[in-house]
Amino acid sequence: MFRDPRQQKAALILALLAMSLAGSPSAWAQDQNTTASIGTAAEEAPALPRFRHIDLGGKPAAFTRESIIVRVDDDFAPFSYTGPAGEAKGIAVETAEAVCAELRTKCNIVLLPWEKLAGGPDNTDGVVAGLRLDEKTLARFQATRPIYRAIGRFAARKESEMKAVTPEEVDGKRIGVVAGSGYETWLKRNFADAEIVPYPTLSDAQDALRTSKVELLFGDGLQMVYWLRGDASQGCCKYVEGAYYDDALFSRPYAFLVSRGDEELKQAFDYALDQLQESGAYAKIFGRYIPGRFW
């Protein structure tokens, strides 16, 4: 998941998962009345897909920097956002802090509005989190291996007896999806015999499933778990078995960005991220910001 101004007002009203919250723990989570707060999260590391290739032998020969500047979006929950006391919070924030601890250095977390994060000419030193990995971004930065990739999921009403989504099972059935999204394109390619019903916003598509105007909803699994567990769904619905990846359409990576040419910092950051993934520490951080599994 990444910050994209074209998506923000539609599907990402969310201050989702330290990817972006505002004011208090996750604007998006607040909208859904289901903030997964740090204090109430289970301490067991949840089973989490490996979003990155692990290279435990990639330890840098030496890393002696006293501090690392990490710039993050101040409104991109749940990955990074401003907490109630003005502090930096979110998955990316805690992960960066854990990386710095692994490297025995100090993280200086800087919260910035997305416009300054994306366009600031002075933001190329240190580490940045929250930008879309497009040509413009990659001309200035190099990306670590990803810490997250979006997962497509189907949801149905709780009374549905559908066990799995197959072309035969959904033939003729109405599937709600956000219009113009990668998820709509994916449905058209893979379930052409279903009746695909596009809606202008995510909340419209969710309401269509809640009120039985469609039989299935397809979209981002992370957004969906907040809705399913929140008050807005009124307990109407559930996941249908199966999780889907498509790198071209909706599973683009969320990664930290390091200044071009700073191979030492990129190698060190990737090494520490590998350690966090292998130890289960990253899964614990991730689990503190979500109200349930969505994979």
Image (cartoon, grey):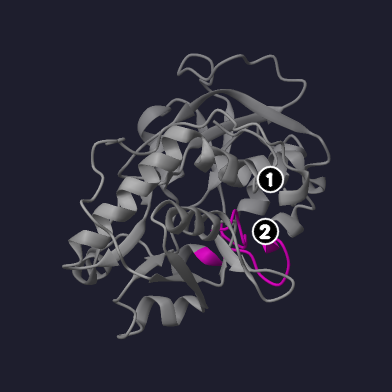
Where residue 131 sits, quadrant-wise, is bottom left
Q: Nearer the viewer, residue 113 or 262?
A: 262
Question: Mark 2 or mark 1, which has the lower sequence index?
Answer: 2
Q: Is residue 146 visible?
A: no
Does 30 lie within the magenta span?
Answer: no
Q: CA distance from mark 2 to mark 1?
A: 8 Å
| Of 230 and 264, the residue lying toward us | 264
**Are there few (<14), some (14-19), or many (20+) residues within 10 Å of tag 2?**
many
Q: Is residue 9 magenta?
A: yes
- 22 shown above or below 18: below
The rendered magenta stretch, by its main secondary structure, is classed as loop
Q: Which residue is pictured at 51% across the width and 42% down the height?
A: 282
The secondary structure type at the circle numbered 1 is helix
Q: Nearer the viewer, residue 151 or 170?
A: 151
The residue nearer to you, when weighing 31 against 263, is 263
Q: Is residue 278 above or below residue 132?
A: above
Q: Name the image quarter holding residue 150.
A: top left
Residue placed farthest to the bottom in the image? 121
Secondary structure state at the residue bearing disc 2: helix
Magenta-drawn segment: 8-27
> CB atoms at circles 2 and 1 under 8 Å apart?
yes
User: In the rendering, at what x and y percent does residue 200 appear?
Assistant: 57, 57
In the rendered image, residue 122, in percent from the top left (x then y), is placed at 32, 85
Residue 12 appears anywhere in the view: yes
**Three-letter residue code for mark 1:** Tyr
> Circle 2 sits on which residue?
28
Identify the disc placed on residue 176.
none
